[in-house]
């Protein structure tokens, strides 16, 4: 009922239409250094408008090759050799025919004194074109230590004669067409539901033109659809800054923040949404964000209205239970969570929340059962793995806790609680060196946690590092005193 990561379909359709812009071909004059790029773009646009998608993709990739080669040549003429090398590298991965790009890349490496890299590229080129005598000759010269070609190859002497202002204009035009090619290639991928690949292509467009709202919009929507929520928030935010009146875009950004667990930012965006009260998914997302940011009291009337208007829901009952638990009303929380499981025995987070409540109440056997049930339906839930490991340690079964903690840290290496508990168990087993690694990591991740400092002090003590142990004991005592003074 409350799918919270589906993008507004109309918004994504708008992306597909907006990226298919009318053709803006470059001059095809023989004197125009961008003529080959212009022809490739024109052919791509013509194929696209005729529905010949494979041909359009091929022509766009040729445009990428020609565009990057031109940018690299311009960089070379102006002495920007590292930039030229990267442009030629991009050209070498843009199209099926890479001979010219690899030659240019090898020469760029040579001009930068990167002989080994140049040899690697020339070897690749020789394998692609085993009958190319010029490539074999150049490879032999490089291996023999023959100096590279001049900084500006003979074929680029006319380009070097172009006025600097005109070269800047050429570069601007080339990069504009590169952005165009990447955008339309990305749209073609997203139309085929290949959102991750589309996001990669839009990302390449954004690297060239980060100030384009259209590019940022395309990148954000594609990442959202690829479920790369944290990566979607930046481009969606930049797109919204250019289109602050776009309510659909604002909602997509809110849902991206929600799925990226930045609940405060999601709540701020949803708070004044005029459609929130009428849209169950938005209302649920807003209530969830309030609960996750510690505003359980404010969330409860939101969910009450949601239940009144849309009927009972297992998902809503779960969040209501979490809100009650947050306020310390464990009995109400258990009632809500039990009701959620009656409505849907597989609803996410219900058993996880029950397990944590039972753990806090000291009902360890019930906590273990609830957490194991949650992990059967959500095996990648690192919070439940850590909670179950805590229960098992308290039950005197630390050996069963160790694999859970290690698996949790494989998924989330910066999980301070899991680092702490793993270090604590290893220390109790006499494995002080292994424990120290995890406890030092934990204290970096959660420097204000007194218990971590205490266990770290004990690890230093066990290893005979008395001075460091005393420093950590002192931090532990200071943090405990500060907590007592701030307690109501």
Image (tube, rainbow, N blue to C red):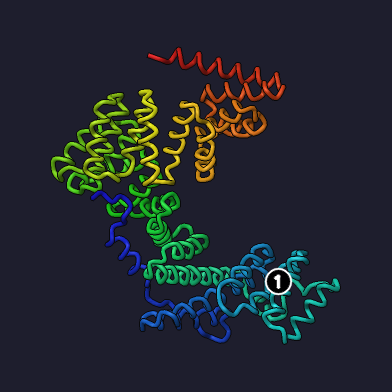
Relative to the observer, which residue lies in front, 68 or 325?
325
Q: Where is residue 154 in the image (x, y as percent from the top left)?
A: 72, 80
Q: Can residue 85 be seen in this view?
A: yes
The quarter of the displayed image where residue 348 is located: top left
The quarter of the displayed image where residue 425 is located: top right
Which residue sits at x=52%, y=18%? 479
Q: Position of residue 433 (x, y in %)?
A: 67, 31
Q: In this view, does 427 lie above or below 312?
A: above
Count residues near mark 1 (Cα–Cα under 10 Å), then give few for <14, some for 14-19, many for 20+: many
Relative to the observer, which residue lies in front, 372 or 464?
372
Q: In this view, does 268 lie to the left or right of 443?
A: left
Q: In this view, does 325 lie to the left or right of 438?
A: left
Q: Position of residue 485 (x, y in %)?
A: 45, 12
Question: Quarter of the image containing the C terminus?
Answer: top left
Q: Where is residue 302 in the image (x, y as percent from the top left)?
A: 21, 37
Relative to the observer, which residue lies in front, 191 or 237?
191
Q: Is residue 107 above or below residue 82?
A: below
Residue underneath mark 1? 121
Element on which disc 1 rests: helix
Q: Is residue 351 above or below residue 360?
A: below
Q: Is residue 38 left or right of residue 342?
A: right
Q: How many labels does the image show?
A: 1
Relative to the observer, which residue lies in front, 83 or 2?
2
Which residue sits at x=48%, y=65%? 201
Q: Is residue 250 visible?
A: no
Which residue sits at x=23%, y=31%? 335
């Amino acid at each position: 009922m409350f799918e919270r990561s589906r993008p507004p379909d109309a918004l994504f359709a708008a992306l597909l239409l907006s990226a298919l812009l009318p053709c803006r071909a470059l001059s095809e004059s023989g004197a125009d250094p961008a003529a080959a790029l212009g022809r490739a773009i024109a052919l791509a646009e013509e194929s696209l408008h005729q529905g010949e998608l494979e041909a359009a993709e091929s022509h766009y990739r040729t445009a990428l090759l020609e565009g990057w080669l031109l940018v690299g040549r311009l960089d070379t003429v102006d002495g920007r050799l590292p930039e030229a090398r990267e442009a030629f590298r991009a050209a070498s991965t843009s199209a099926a025919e890479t001979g010219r790009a690899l030659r240019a890349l090898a020469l760029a490496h040579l001009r930068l004194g990167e002989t080994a890299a140049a040899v690697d590229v020339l070897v690749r080129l020789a394998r692609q074109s085993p009958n190319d005598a010029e490539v074999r000759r150049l490879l032999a010269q490089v291996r023999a230590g023959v100096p590279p070609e001049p900084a500006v190859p003979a074929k680029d002497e006319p380009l070097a004669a172009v006025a600097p202002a005109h070269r800047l204009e050429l570069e601007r035009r080339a990069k504009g067409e590169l952005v165009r090619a990447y955008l339309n290639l990305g749209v073609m991928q997203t139309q085929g539901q290949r959102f991750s690949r589309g996001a990669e292509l839009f990302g390449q467009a954004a690297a060239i033109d980060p100030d384009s709202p259209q590019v940022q919009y395309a990148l954000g929507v594609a990442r959202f659809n690829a479920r790369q929520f944290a990566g979607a928030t930046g481009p969606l935010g930049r797109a919204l800054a250019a289109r602050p009146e776009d309510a659909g875009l604002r909602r997509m950004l809110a849902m991206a923040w929600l799925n990226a667990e930045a609940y405060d930012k999601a709540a701020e965006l949803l708070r004044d949404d005029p459609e929130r009260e009428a849209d169950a998914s938005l209302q649920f997302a807003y209530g969830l964000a309030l609960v996750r940011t510690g505003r359980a009291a404010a969330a409860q009337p939101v969910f009450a209205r949601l239940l009144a208007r849309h009927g009972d829901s297992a998902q809503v009952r779960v969040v209501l239970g979490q809100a009650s638990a947050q306020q310390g009303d464990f009995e109400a929380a258990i009632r809500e969570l039990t009701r959620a499981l009656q409505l849907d025995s597989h609803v996410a987070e219900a058993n996880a929340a029950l397990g944590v409540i039972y753990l806090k109440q000291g009902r360890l056997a019930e906590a273990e059962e609830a957490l194991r049930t949650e992990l059967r339906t959500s095996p990648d839930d690192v919070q439940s793995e850590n909670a179950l490991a805590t229960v098992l340690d308290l039950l005197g079964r630390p050996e069963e806790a160790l694999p859970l903690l290690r698996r949790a840290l494989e998924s989330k290496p910066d999980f301070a609680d899991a680092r702490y508990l793993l270090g604590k168990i290893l220390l109790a087993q006499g494995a002080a060196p292994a424990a120290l690694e995890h406890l030092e990591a934990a204290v970096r991740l959660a420097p204000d946690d007194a218990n971590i400092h205490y266990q770290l002090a004990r690890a230093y003590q066990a290893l005979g590092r008395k001075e460091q142990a005393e420093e950590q004991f002192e931090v532990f005592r200071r943090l405990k005193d500060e907590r007592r003074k701030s307690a109501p």
